[in-house]
Image: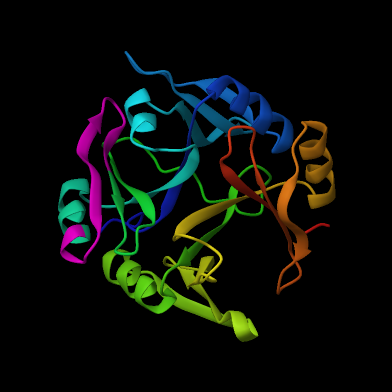
Amino acid sequence: MSSAHGQLAWYELMTTDAAAAETFYKAVVGWNAGDASQPGMTYTTFLAGNTPVAGLMTLPESACAVGARPGWIGYVVVDDADVYSVRVTEAGGQVHRPAADIPGIGRFAVVADPQGAAFVLFKGITGVSVPPALPDQPGYAAWRELMAADGESAFSFYSNLFGWTKADAVDLGPMGTYQLFAAGGAAIGGMMTKPPSIPAPFWTYYFRVDSIEAAVSRLQAAGWNVINGPHQVPGGDWIVQGLDPQGAMFALFSPHA
């Protein structure tokens, strides 16, 4: 396996108003934006400084027609998108979009784990590098979080597929255990069994900002409010979750209140 296998390396927002979303995230997160469009498809990259860290595109009308809603999805690097699509289904997951090429970039497939949380399998072509993982830098992904129907079986699925390992576990009392996981190094995220009030499993991606207070001020100045937080998490860092203007959930992280 390649050293990048199993890394969550890209984050993509599919939304109903890409222009409005670009304006919002540039203001709140502090990203720059670049054009990475392909023939027949408009695609915007979000940049931390000059480094692309995430993408933005318009939800196809066909997807909206069958109930797709704006949201973020993460790309997991694999050695072969076709092979791992098969492994996902063999493990009880689903393939929402079979493996296909992104000209000049790589090959991808949109899949879901056995509990329904969606993610993307991605294999880059030779010469296409994975964006650096710099969780201590503003604009980069700092944390990844799965709310699962069953946290333990969800971890087994991802561990068997990508080689993720358990890091620390945080006892949340009546809410259960928050299991941190690693992908070849330090912990990069956590997962747990969702509370009954959450209707379905999903992934959330936390992007680092200068401070949570400043980010919340920018969020409110843009006319939108938070849905959870701000609050401090074990270890002393601060997080906040919100909905963007098109209804996609997003999350921010900072060591500073």
Above-or-below relation of 233 to 202:
below
Q: In which quarter of the image is the C terminus?
A: bottom right
Percent from the top left, x then y, of residue 188? 52, 63
Q: Can residue 254 be seen in this view?
A: no
Residue located at (80% from left, 45% from top): 216
Percent from the top left, x then y, of residue 156? 33, 75
Residue located at (20% from left, 49% from top): 80
Percent from the top left, x then y, of residue 139? 64, 42
Above-or-below relation of 57 to 141:
above
Span colored in magenta? 89-109
- Near-viewer residue (142 or 217): 217
Q: Is residue 83 visible?
A: yes
Q: Quadrant of the N terminus?
A: bottom left
- Near-viewer residue (85 or 80): 85
Taking the view exactly as shown, the residue that stands out farthest to the top is 39
Residue located at (50% from left, 27% from top): 16
Prevailing secondary structure class for the magenta stretch in the rendered image: strand
State which quadrant residue 138 falls in. top right
Q: Does the magenta segment cover residue 148?
A: no
Above-or-below relation of 62 to 176:
above
Residue located at (72% from left, 69% from top): 233
Percent from the top left, x then y, of residue 53? 53, 39
User: In the image, 158: left or right of 32?
Assistant: left
